[in-house]
Amino acid sequence: MTDLVVRRLLIDLVAPFRARWNGNDAFRSAFFNALSMSFPVGEQYFMDSVRAGLKALPEEKRQAIATEVQGFVGQEATHRRIHALFNGHLETLGFDNVLERRAAKRIRNNAHLDVRVHVAATAATEHLTALFADWMFRHPEALHGAEPRLQTLWMWHAAEEAEHCSTAFDVYTALHGTEKWRLRLLRYITWTFAMDITRQTVRNLWHDGSLFKWNTWHSAAKLLFAKDGMIRSNYALWRAYKAPTFHPRQQDISRSVQWLHDNRERFAVVGQAA
């Protein structure tokens, strides 16, 4: 079981920011904006899924993991609120969050499925975000030139994603979810998430007027597909999820832990799983 701290960021998210807030780089800004656009609806789904999974457990198992789930929900609720504020600024800049509407419809259409499916989908997504988090700490240049307050927002989110990467997985295991469905949901979530983010990034670039510029796609290739890019360098870690003996805690989250320790003045602790 993992002790999870709920933190309140001590940064100003009232002041507006530019469309190309990420170092004036059109692609990096559009891509991170698309990620943020996915978070509020996604994190609400994660909270609902894990709480439903906890409720479906026998009393003894429920007590063993209830406190960690409480911390998980607290962290995700904070992420949802902060990114809703971030997305509000994007809306004032004219960006249309089609991704959120598409994802919300998909969630409604699949609401009838077994709770284990939803928990497995959450665990798979948490694996992707944990990979993203570790990559961010190894590649701070992904936010080069961004305002310090926005750098803090993204690094804080990444650190907490790494911190709670095992919660949904442990709930799924406690529910006796099968390996077949765990791996099936990994493939489904990877494809769906990639398509959602790609579509929204393209829409963001179209709105920004930079979709057909060479510099845009040069930046995309460097960020995502370079030898140490976000996608190419994480493939082996993505595949690690397929191992029958896999557990999220096998992954190194020391960079996230160190960042949280070194940046304690940037947030206030408002709760902790005891």
Image: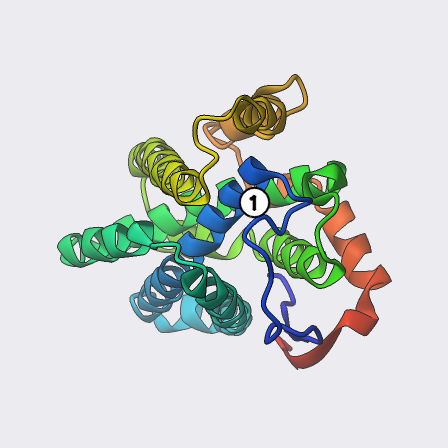
Say which residue label 1 marks.
29
Query: How has the structure been colored for display?
Result: rainbow
Q: Position of residue 75 (x, y in %)?
A: 55, 68
Q: Is residue 117 left or right of residue 207?
A: left
Q: Amino acid at mark 1?
A: Ser
Q: Is residue 31 left or right of residue 55?
A: right
Q: In this rendering, does residue 145 appear at all?
A: yes
Q: Position of residue 179 (x, y in %)?
A: 35, 35
Q: Residue at x 62, y 62 (%)?
A: 2
Q: Nearer the viewer, residue 219 or 227?
A: 219
Q: In which quadrant of the rendered image does the N terminus lie?
A: bottom right
Q: Nearer the viewer, residue 53 or 174?
A: 53
Q: Residue at x 56, y 27 (%)?
A: 224
Q: In which quadrant of the rendered image does the C terminus lie?
A: bottom right
Which residue reaches farthest right?
262
Q: In this rendering, does residue 116 appear at all?
A: no
Within 10 Å of disc 1 (Cα), the crowding (few <14, some 14-19, many 20+) is many
Q: Position of residue 236 (x, y in %)?
A: 57, 22
